[in-house]
Amino acid sequence: MGWDYSEEDVEEVFKSGRMVGHRLDSGEVISSAALFPYGDELATLGVVIVNPAYKGRGLGRELVESVLASKGERSILLVATREGKPL
């Protein structure tokens, strides 16, 4: 997707939060979103990415809804890029 995450960064995401996404039958990951909890009261939503070839199909919205459904009673903080504003 052009983001400069290292393999170590991605592994840290998996350790730190709940990650969801879509994968093609070929195994290619085409979308992602993650929830990062900070105790029982706060969490952040991040790493919301959809491959440009698959945008406009509701994948990002589906992932964000899935992550929000798992937040429990936590408040959510989102810092979005300009590209993420419509979502």
Image (cartoon, helix red, strand yellow):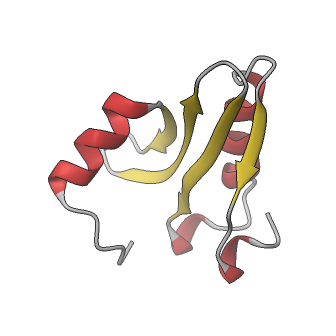
Which residue is pictured at 57% across the width and 52% down the height?
A: 46
Which residue is pictured at 68% across the width and 64% down the height?
A: 79
Residue 66 or 58: which is nearer the viewer?
66
Residue 82 or 74: which is nearer the viewer?
74
Picture mark count: 0
In the image, taking residue 72 as reference, residue 46 lies left or right, namely left
Quarter of the image containing the N terminus? bottom left
Q: Considering only vertical position in the picture, is 32 above or below 25?
A: below
Q: Residue furthest left?
A: 7
In the image, taking residue 20 as reference, residue 15 lies left or right, namely left
Question: Residue 23 location in percent, x, y?
Answer: 42, 42
Which residue is pictured at 72% across the width and 58% down the height?
A: 57
Which residue is pictured at 46% across the width and 31% down the height?
A: 17
In the image, taking residue 72 as reference, residue 25 lies left or right, namely left
Which quadrant of the view contains residue 16?
top left
Quarter of the image containing the C terminus? bottom right
Q: Considering only vertical position in the picture, is 37 above or below 60?
A: above
